[in-house]
Every structure is written in C-alpha cells, then in structure tokens.
Image (cartoon, rainbow, N blue to C red):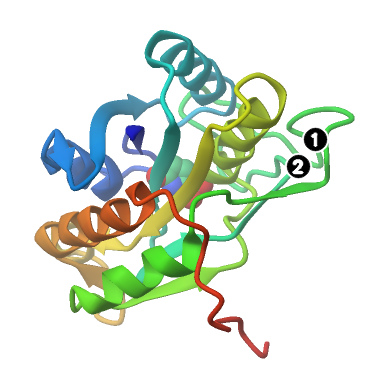
Amino acid sequence: MKLLTTGFAPFGGERINPAWEAVRRLPDRLGEAELIKAEMPTSFAGCAAALEEACRLWRPDGVLCVGQAGGRACVTVERVAINLAEASIPDNDGAKPVDQPLVPGGPAAYFATLPVKAMVRRVREAGIPCQISYTAGTYVCNCLMYRALHLAAEVYPGMRAGFIHVPYALRQAADKPGSTPSMSLEAITAALAAAIEAAALGQEDLGTGMGTTH
Ligand code: PCA
C-alpha cells in the first residue's frame, strides 16, 4: 500500500509541530506500507491545495494525516470529519473563518475509511495510550481530514483516508503549566508506526465495540 503520510507545520506560536516531527522520523517502509511523507501548511486553503497536489503527484492508495492536539493526553485516531471551518486563532496565512462550510453543498460529515479500531488496538499493543476520538475539531486538522475524504469520494475512488491527533511533545510542555499533558517524540513516532502497520493490512475494521458513553 502506498500511503501518503502528512504532518503539519508549527502554528499558534509553537516552535515545532510534534506531528511532522514524528512523521519525518518514520522509516520509508513499514510492514505492507510504502510511505510518502509530506509536510502540510497549517492553513485552511494551503493544506487543501497541498493535499490535492500530493495526491495528483503520488496517486496514493491511502492518506494518513497527523496533527497536534495540544491538551490531549494520548494519541487519538479520528473517526469523523465535519464540513465546518470555525477558527479561534488565525491559521498561518491569517485566515480565521467562522461558520463556513469547507465544501459548500458537500456532505455534513465523512467517516474515516482507514480501520480506526484496528489502528487503536495496534497502538495500545505497542504499549502507548490511544483512544478513538469523535471530533477532529473545527480548525485546520478537521479541514484536511474532510478534504482527504472528499477527494477520495469525488476523485480517487478506493483511496482510503484517516487522521491521527497527537499530544504535545515533551519539550513543548516544558514551559507550560505542570498539568499540560505531553508525550515523547519517540513514543509518538512508535504510535504512528503501529497505526500505519494496522492500516496497511488493508482489512475491514474490527467489530469490537469501542465507543464512549458521553
Ligand atoms: N493541529 C491543528 C492544525 C494543525 C495541527 O497540527 C488542528 O488540530 O486543527
């Protein structure tokens, strides 16, 4: 499986983005996956254009995008992307959309088409805390996940897509309040590797119940 794996540029005053730091540390081959790595601009418009260009160029069988979720304590595999751009801080191009659809007239939401539960289980088996998330937010990460799934739906049938959010790296949390959760880049990279190995098996997702009660 040719898997386009992306991470974002730093944003919001951070000096690094743990998503791209971990993605760029991954090997070029992982199990059944041949990885193509690309850094995405943290910009609503820019990431959509960069993703379209990368898909046109590489024709991947799958797309796994990775982003920073500062404040989350574990690795989270996203289940759903929504057709909404609503920013509380400007993106790296200064855009701050409010109540905007990402794709006017597009579906309200898309579910991830990578095997979310199998990925979560594999990351946990690697000894790293991991959960399913049912919201990728309304900022640039949700935008990229929605765009990838929309591109698959409209242009590249059969291309699977999904998204993983990762916590701050240790060094980002070092000068934040003591209760700020973080994870080592080594652990984040190992989590991505485990998730990719599961995704690259190309199987249907597990039938196990994993949801939340609130
Ligand atoms: N995280 C942001 C955008 C880029 C990133 O790494 C988000 O969760 O939307």
Residue lying at 48% horizontally and 58% vertically, measured from the top left:
115
Residue that badge 2 annotates: 83
Side (left or right) of 160 relative to 196: right
| Label 2 residue SS | loop
Categorize mark 1 by other alpha carbons within 10 Å: few (<14), some (14-19), many (20+): some
Sequence order check, earlier mark of 1 and 2: 2
User: x and y percent of residue 185 in the render?
Assistant: 14, 57
Residue lying at 81% horizontally and 42% vertically, measured from the top left:
99
Q: Looking at the image, is 213 positioned above or below residue 8?
A: below
- Mark 1 CB lies closer than 8 A to ligand 1: no
Mark number displayed over residue 168: none
Of the residues shown, which amino acid type is indicated by label 2? Answer: Asn
User: x and y percent of residue 70 in the render?
Assistant: 38, 61
Q: Are marks 1 and 2 in contact (CB under 8 Å)?
A: yes
Of the residues shown, which amino acid type is indicated by label 1? Answer: Pro
Side (left or right) of 39 relative to 188: right
Residue that badge 1 annotates: 101
User: x and y percent of residue 72 in the render?
Assistant: 40, 70
Residue lying at 27% horizontally and 27% vertically, measured from the top left:
36
Image quadrant in which you'd find residue 38: top left
Q: Quadrant of the N terminus?
A: top left
Categorize mark 2 by other alpha carbons within 10 Å: few (<14), some (14-19), many (20+): many
Q: Looking at the image, is 93 positioned above or below residue 167?
A: above
Image quadrant in which you'd find residue 77: bottom left
